[in-house]
């Protein structure tokens, strides 16, 4: 075995020696050939040629034309343009549902990958009230369709746990929250879009499930629902609002004056506001029993919100009745058969029981009538009081004070105020108040500051 190993080592050494010898011989031959090579006749004797070693071949970088550089800058500037400007540029003249859908189509066709879709959806949600599509379910589904499909779906439980693509999921939840704020219930198309975009376990899908659980429960919970589309006519809107405030089916709504435009003898055009009042039979009875020596007050305006509209109303009321003037009337046992209004129970009491109850009663005084008008001025409200005298003749004997606060702009327009001052003769009620009564000047010539101090 040892002799075989020695023979193999000797063979390897001989092979290595031969290879080194051949390499040395080959190098000597190259040096001899180069020494025999004569220099060219044109080159000077002192010039030495140098060999340049170049790397792998590569194309030279050509200069980029200026027009292409400017084009890239323009594209970059266009990408930085706010999406709000896109809505303004496309819908310059008319802002409708068709123009809103046109803006969405322009964004979708602009880029196949739909880069910047989150910013565009946020801008679209903000612009929806301006286009009047904030309550349109089709438009919300169209905005959901802007999201790329099957890109933000989590592939495993780890991605689902770590909120896969948080910005996109927050945008989807914000879209559903706006639908919830406007009372829009999603449909099956909304569910299919959410599953395609975020999967069945994403946060937007959870939000969709909560909406579909609670909305049907609260849909008919309000016993006095407000219609989605309120009347545009101010008289009809005032009639609906007063009926809702009164909460008495026997209350009578009276239109004392319709809004109209009149021309005076001098040729000046004036606009008269509407005056609508309401009064129930029980209020007529209370006003008939009122003490004529105690004044009445016209107060307002008080706001009432009906969905997105705010209306204002005025009340005719009196101060609380003094304790010495209160008269307890016996209850009618047949007035309410379901719930008795008075109970006479003779119960055995202990010596430590108290017969009196510590209950704090707050008496704000009776309200005799309410009205709504387009102009909250004393002259307009005088017409309302004059109209109430037909069913309440006691108003001709009771002094009336006006406690009017600074109303909104729509109730105190400068043009309407100036035009109404030219209205015809003085109301009859104002003439009746000038009869000899107790301090009539305070009733007729009361300044606003004085009335506000009285109210306080």
Image: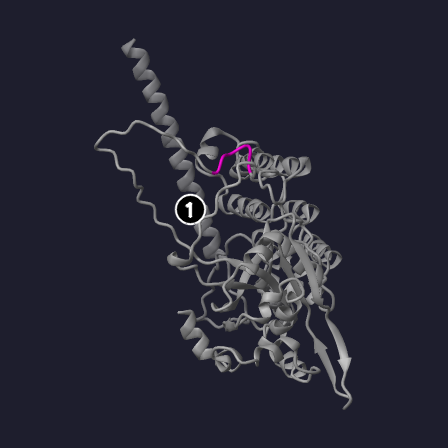
Q: Main secondary structure of the magenta part?
A: loop
Residue matched to label 1: 28
Quarter of the picture holding the N terminus: top left
Camera sees residue 175: yes
- Residue 33 against residue 314 in the figure, above or below: above
Vertical position of residue 81 compared to residue 9: above or below: below
Q: Is residue 1 magenta?
A: no
In percent of width and height, residue 159 lies at 47, 34
Q: Nearer the viewer, residue 411 or 277?
A: 277
Q: For the point 46% across and 46% down, which residue is it?
A: 29
Which quarter of the picture shows residue 272?
A: bottom right
Q: Residue 216 versus residue 84: which sits nearer the camera?
A: 216
Q: Is residue 290 above or below residue 44?
A: above
Q: Residue at x 46, y 62 (%)?
A: 50
The image shows residue 104 at horizontal and vertical percentages of 69, 54
Outermost residue to the top? 1
Q: Which residues are magenta?
A: 336-341
Where does residue 129 sit, x and y in percent of width and height?
A: 63, 58
Q: Residues within 10 Å of mark 1 (few under 14, many from 20)?
A: few
Q: Secondary structure at mark 1?
A: helix
The quadrant in which residue 85 appears is: bottom right
What percent of the width, then of the height, locates residue 392?
62, 63
Q: How is the image coloured?
A: one colour
Q: Residue at x 60, y 46 (%)?
A: 179
Decide if residue 72 is in sight here: no
């Amino acid at each position: 075995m040892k002799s075989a190993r020695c023979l193999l080592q000797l063979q390897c050494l001989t092979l290595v020696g031969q290879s080194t010898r051949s390499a040395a011989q080959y190098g000597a031959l190259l040096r001899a050939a180069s020494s025999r090579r004569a220099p060219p006749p044109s080159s000077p004797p002192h010039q030495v040629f140098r060999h340049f070693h170049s790397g792998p071949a590569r194309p030279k970088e050509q200069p980029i034309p200026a027009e292409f550089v400017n084009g890239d800058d323009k594209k970059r500037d266009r990408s930085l343009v706010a999406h709000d400007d896109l809505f303004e540029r496309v819908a310059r003249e008319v802002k409708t549902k068709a123009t809103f859908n046109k803006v969405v189509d322009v964004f979708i066709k602009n880029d196949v990958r739909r880069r910047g879709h989150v910013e565009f959806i946020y801008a679209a949600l903000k612009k929806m009230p301006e286009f009047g599509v904030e309550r349109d379910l089709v438009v919300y589904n169209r905005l959901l369709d802007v999201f790329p499909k099957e890109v933000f779906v989590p592939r495993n439980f780890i991605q689902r746990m770590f909120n896969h693509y948080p910005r996109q999921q927050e945008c989807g939840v914000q879209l559903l929250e706006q639908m919830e704020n406007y009372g829009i219930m999603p449909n099956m198309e909304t569910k299919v879009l959410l599953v395609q975009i975020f999967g069945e376990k994403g946060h937007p899908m959870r939000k969709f499930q909560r909406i579909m659980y609670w909305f049907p429960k609260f849909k008919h919970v309000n016993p006095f629902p407000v219609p989605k589309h309120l009347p545009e006519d101010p008289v009809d809107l005032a009639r609906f609002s007063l009926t809702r405030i009164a909460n008495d089916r026997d209350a009578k709504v009276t239109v004392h004056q319709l809004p109209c435009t009149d021309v005076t003898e001098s040729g000046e055009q004036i606009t008269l506001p509407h005056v609508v009042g309401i009064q129930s039979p029980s209020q007529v009875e209370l006003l008939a029993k009122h003490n004529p020596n105690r004044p009445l007050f016209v107060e307002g305006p008080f706001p009432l919100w009906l969905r997105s509209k705010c209306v204002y109303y005025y009340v005719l009321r009196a101060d609380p009745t003094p304790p010495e003037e209160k008269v307890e009337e016996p209850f009618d046992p047949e007035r309410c058969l379901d719930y008795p209004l008075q109970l006479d129970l003779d119960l055995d009491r202990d010596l430590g029981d108290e017969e009196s109850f510590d209950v704090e009663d707050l008496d704000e005084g009776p309200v005799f009538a309410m009205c709504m008008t387009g102009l909250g001025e004393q002259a307009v409200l005088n017409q309302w009081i004059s109209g109430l005298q037909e069913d309440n003749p006691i108003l001709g004997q009771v002094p009336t004070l006006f406690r009017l606060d600074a109303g909104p702009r729509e109730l105190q327009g400068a043009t309407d105020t100036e035009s109404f001052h030219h209205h015809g003769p003085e109301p009859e009620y104002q003439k009746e108040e000038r009869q000899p009564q107790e301090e009539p000047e305070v009733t007729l010539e009361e300044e606003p500051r004085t009335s506000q101090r009285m109210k306080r």
